[in-house]
Amino acid sequence: MSKLTIADAALQLGVSKEAIHNRIRRGSLKSIIENGVKFVILGEEKSNTSTHAPSSDRYTQYIESENIRLRDRVEVLETETTRLRDQREEMLIAQRVNVEEIYKERDAQLRNILNVVATRFLSHVNPDTVVREGMGQESVEQEEPTIIYDHDVINAHIIPDATLNDDWVSLKSFLKLKRYPEVIKKNLKRRFKAAALEGDERFIEKNEKLYLNPSMYDYSDLLVGAPLA
């Protein structure tokens, strides 16, 4: 029987100091305290538990190693999660930028088309050519004037009347150029006619038809809620 400090006992038994404390708590090692110092009494381990102590120590070491392994694994997974989250954010930002660029391009084309309609829409100009010019595909000056013989085409509704200059177009032609769905056209037609009946100076009625002048007046207030053509 020998009396050793915790450190000496751990060195002699080949285990950690924590293992010595665990044995003391389990009662497999006897300890005493002298002058505030804890000593271990070796040679009096309980026979029924001493044979299991090494196995318990191995189990404790196994648990500790598993905890370390699991912590490392969690750290790897957290790093991977962060990487995937950042990658997703980058993809979303790239997609948003692409969508914004598409809409900017469409808005610019629409503005060009409306400007051409407002300033260059003459009775001899084909509406498809006006649209292409607004999109920057070709110029009206490079196209030969179109002579209209078929009154079913869109420009048949532009009145070649001496009292109305070339800037005045029929409501039907104006809405047809917008290429709205028929349901939207019907609603806009009622809205425009109602404004004309209220005395809106932006409209002229001739031969029971309504005419408007996009180059002189702004009709955006009446187009509120209509989809882009």
Image (tube, rainbow, N blue to C red):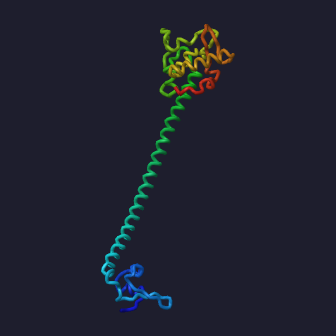
Q: Which picture quadrant has residue 162?
A: top right
Compared to residue 147, the image places residue 113 above or below, namely below
* Residue 64 place in picture, x, y as percent: 38, 71
Q: At 60% from the left edge and 27% from the top edge, which residue is drawn? A: 224
Name the foreground residue: 160 vs 217.
217
Q: At 58% from the left edge and 17% from the top edge, which residue is drawn? A: 189
Left or right: residue 18 versus residue 193 is: left
* Residue 13 place in picture, x, y as percent: 34, 84
Q: Residue furthest top?
A: 207
Name the foreground residue: 81 vs 121.
81
Name the foreground residue: 74 vs 218.
74
Q: Quadrant of the N terminus?
A: bottom left
Q: At 50% from the left edge and 91% from the top edge, which residue is drawn? A: 35
Compared to residue 221, the image places residue 34 above or below, namely below
Left or right: residue 121 versus residue 76 is: right
* Residue 5 place in picture, x, y as percent: 42, 88
* Residue 51 place in picture, x, y as percent: 30, 80
Name the foreground residue: 9 vs 216.
9
Badge count:
0
